[in-house]
Image (cartoon, helix red, strand yellow):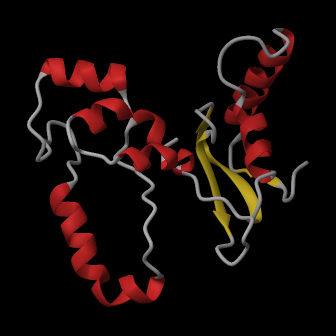
Amino acid sequence: NMRVPGLFYVNDFLKDLIFEELEMHCRHQGVGGFLPAVKQVANVAALPGIVSRSIGLPDIHSGYGFAIGNVAAFDMNDPQAIVSPGGVGFDINCGVRLIRTNLDEKDVLPVKEQLCQSLFDHIPVGVGSQGIIPTSSQNLEDALEMGMDWSLREGYAWAEDKEHCE
């Protein structure tokens, strides 16, 4: 069902590792673990709106949804095209979030520099960084256990936000 080709940028050593991962997956009849990176690149190549290729970079390895090191672009003029934070590391909390707004590009363009600076100022990045929400070990445990319901309980989200979360 691939809409575009999958392309890998790897040397012979890495190619052998990628195919070894695929062979092991096939030997276990697909039971256990993540899908092999090769299959994940193929799955991304089948997504609606993908442009040109699903690309595997030299650091490619199995991930959650997209393979780690899998790159793809999607046509924003295609109404069937997808937008997925899974392609950029949301599963390991890389600080990537997808937020639905009613803003159009024309609304954002005049203030994009200020918007980017504000996001940078308010989103913690890097080892040891801290956010503006005071937290404790128990709060972290509760948030991990309850997920979106914790955010609702603490007043950091609205009930309708749950409809737009992965």
Q: What residue do we see at 35% from left, 19% from top?
A: 145
Q: Is residue 78 left or right of 133 when viewed as pictured?
A: right
In the figure, 123 relative to 120: above or below? above
In the figure, 25 relative to 156: above or below? above
68 or 94, which is in the foreground?
94
In the figure, 65 relative to 88: above or below? above
Q: How many marks?
A: 0
Question: Could you tell me residue 154's position as x and y percent?
Answer: 20, 36
In the figure, 154 relative to 114: above or below? above
Question: Could you tell me residue 93's position as x and y percent?
Answer: 37, 38
Q: In the orientation shown, which residue stands out farthest toward the right?
A: 1
60 or 64, which is in the foreground?
64
Q: In the figure, residue 126 lies in which quadrant?
A: top left
Q: Is residue 69 left or right of 27 when viewed as pictured?
A: left
Q: In the orientation shown, which residue stands out farthest toward the front?
A: 159
Q: In the figure, residue 63 lies in which quadrant?
A: top right
Question: Could you tell me residue 110's position as x and y percent?
Answer: 32, 90
Q: What residue do we see at 75% from left, 29% from top?
A: 16
